[in-house]
Amino acid sequence: MEIAIVSDTHVPSRASRIPDPFRERIRAADHVVHAGDFDAESTVADVRDLADTLTAVRGNTDPAVGLPEVATVELGGVSFVVTHGTGSKRGYEDRVARLVREHGGTDAVGISGHTHEVLDTTRGGVRLLNPGSATAASPATSATMLTATAADGDLTVRRHEL
């Protein structure tokens, strides 16, 4: 299963739209995960239109559009816990790893955003992924996203940068 992982699009406040190469990766994916900070209800609708299936959470800049703060999904035999990661940068990885353990256990993979910095690390035995900002919203210096292949419980992750 091919998964597109994006976050912190911040459309329209910091960017006019998700870049075309990333829109194509989202369209091509079997499933899309967005870790929040869409910025507007119209951006949520745009991503929903691009995605075959979508798991999304609310970020700290998102309006009340019915998105949860935490979502769980199993794809290709891999359990994911998705959250924005809202809060201070200090303690961010520990905070997200703790939430992943609470909602999905130690075998779950955490997907979060908020920092606008790409991350693929393990913290306290929990793998954490952050795709950065798909639109290079400040403080990001480039537009980034992740794609992943999940099959039979194995996960391979790739970084894409514009």
Image (cartoon, rainbow, N blue to C red):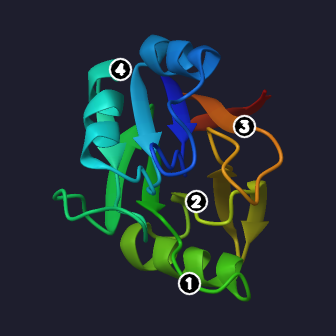
Numbered mark located on residue 143 in the image: 3
Q: Position of residue 153 (x, y in %)?
A: 53, 38
Toward the viewer: 155 or 133? 133
**Closer to viewer: mark 1 or mark 3:** 3
Q: From the viewer's perspective, is residue 100 above or below residue 38?
A: below
Image quadrant of residue 126? bottom right
Q: Position of residue 35 (x, y in %)?
A: 47, 53
How far apart marks 3 and 4 lie (CA) works out to 18 Å
- Amino acid at dot 1: Gly
Ranked by sequence position, the earlier of labels 1 and 2 is 1
Ranked by sequence position, the earlier of labels 3 and 4 is 4
Q: Identify residue for label 2.
A: 113
Numbered mark located on residue 50 in the image: 4
Residues marked 1 and 3 touching at CB (< 8 Å): no
Numbered mark located on residue 87 in the image: 1
How far apart marks 1 and 4 lie (CA) works out to 29 Å
- Amino acid at dot 3: Ala
- Secondary element at tag 2: loop
- Secondary element at tag 4: helix
Q: Residue at x 63, y 36 (%)?
A: 155
For label 1, count other residues whose C-alpha is less than 10 Å away and answer few (under 14), some (14-19) or many (20+). Answer: few
